[in-house]
Image (spheres, rainbow, N blue to C red):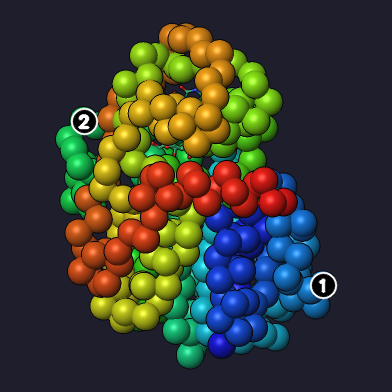
Amino acid sequence: MKVLITGGAGFIGSHVAEHFIKQQHDVYVVDNLSSGYRANIPFIDDDHFFHTDIRNYDEIESIIQTHQFDIIIHLAAVVSVVDTVENPEESNDVNISALVHLLELCRKHLSHLKKFIFASSAAVYGNETTLPKSINSHIQPESPYAIQKYSSEQYVKLYHTLYHLPTTSLRFFNVYGPKQDPQSQYSGVLSIMKNCFDHDKTFTFFGDGEQTRDFVYVKDIVQAVQVVLKQQASDGQVYNVGTSQPTSLLAIYKTFVSLYQKEIPVAFADPRDGDVKHSYADIEPLKQLGFLNRYTLQEGLDEYLKFEMNH
Ligand code: UD2
């Protein structure tokens, strides 16, 4: 099948692309390389790689018309919450307008489309304290990013209701794994902690370290994509993707200590403004489709560390 992955050179996109390549699909990637890297996808040749922005509407239309994709996985976005706070208007164009444009192109040109998957985020739940976060939990967007993800998933759903496009949205919780970029203080905390262990740098806990997150290994995200692809019952639906296990940062730190067989210096600073204290996902609806987490945190971290050592 012909698969298009927007944002396919990014952290999550590159794993999704690799999965489809291994399954012998014909995989195309659109990426402007603003946060992804061409080197993340050496298995995609230049004929299958479009170095362009999803806001280049004419070019995107021509790609869609020419290639007649069976599956589209839409991961391209302004992925940093901080960037959306600094640039609400521009990020709105990327995260909402370009998505609506892509959906329109599917409606106009891809009558045989088998699935359109959109990457949403646990950010839509904001600081509301009810746990676990379920699809029916209160939505409380607290950044342009969260508003954009929520609006987009509603568009994605509406295109199923109004135009019968086979669309599904996935709300990712805290994803970690190989190729996650640790460069900014707003990168995923596990990539930052790993970087500190690799270079014997001080890791700073924002707050007391007792905060919990639902850390999900990137290959389980790939599996969730595969599960919803196979299940028509997922059309028009939104699913959480996590592990349904909350883990504290202090517990993660201890796991790193045992995996690396060493300690590193740590510090404690004030909690980040607006930081959520606890978060984990209700993933029952996804399990009912056949999803089962393949990686415990220990297994995911173990594979993550080994991968990075070998590359
Ligand atoms: C995640 C997403 C964010 C948004 C949000 C929605 C990532 C990187 N961020 O933010 O985009 O979707 O979920 O709820 O996926 N921390 C430290 N030290 C550090 C870095 C972080 O203590 O050096 C703490 C941080 O204050 C937070 C926890 O670690 O309490 C997790 O931080 P994060 O940025 O990895 O993820 P989160 O859940 O805040």
Question: Secondary structure beneath disc 2?
Answer: loop
Direction from residue 245 to residue 168 in the image, left or right? right
User: Does the closest atom of ligand 1 sit within 8 Å of the Cβ of label 1?
Assistant: no
> Badge 2 is on which residue?
129
Look at label 1 and name its amino acid. Answer: Asp
The residue closer to the viewer here, 209 or 281, is: 209
Q: Quadrant of residue 262?
A: top right
The residue closer to the viewer here, 305 or 121, is: 305
Q: Position of residue 149 (x, y in %)?
A: 43, 49
| Residue found farthest to the bottom | 112
Look at label 2 and name its amino acid. Answer: Thr
**Numbered mark located on residue 197 in the image:** none
- Residue at (28% x, 30% y) in the render: 278
Estimate how packed mark 2 is, as few (under 14), some (14 to 19) or many (20 or more) residues with alpha carbons within 10 Å: some
**300 over 128 or under it: above or below:** below
Q: Are marks 2 and 1 in contact (CB under 8 Å)?
A: no
Estimate how packed mark 1 is, as few (under 14), some (14 to 19) or many (20 or more) residues with alpha carbons within 10 Å: few
Question: Secondary structure beneath disc 1?
Answer: helix
- Residue at (48% x, 90% y) in the render: 112
> Badge 1 is on which residue?
46
Q: Earlier in the sequence, mark 2 or mark 1?
A: 1
- Residue at (32% x, 75% y) in the render: 235
The image quadrant where one finds the N terminus is bottom right
Q: Position of residue 185 (x, y in %)?
A: 59, 25
Ligand 1 shown in quarter: top left
Direction from residue 178 to residue 292 in the image, left or right? left
Q: Position of residue 161 (x, y in %)?
A: 30, 73
Q: Quadrant of residue 194?
A: top right
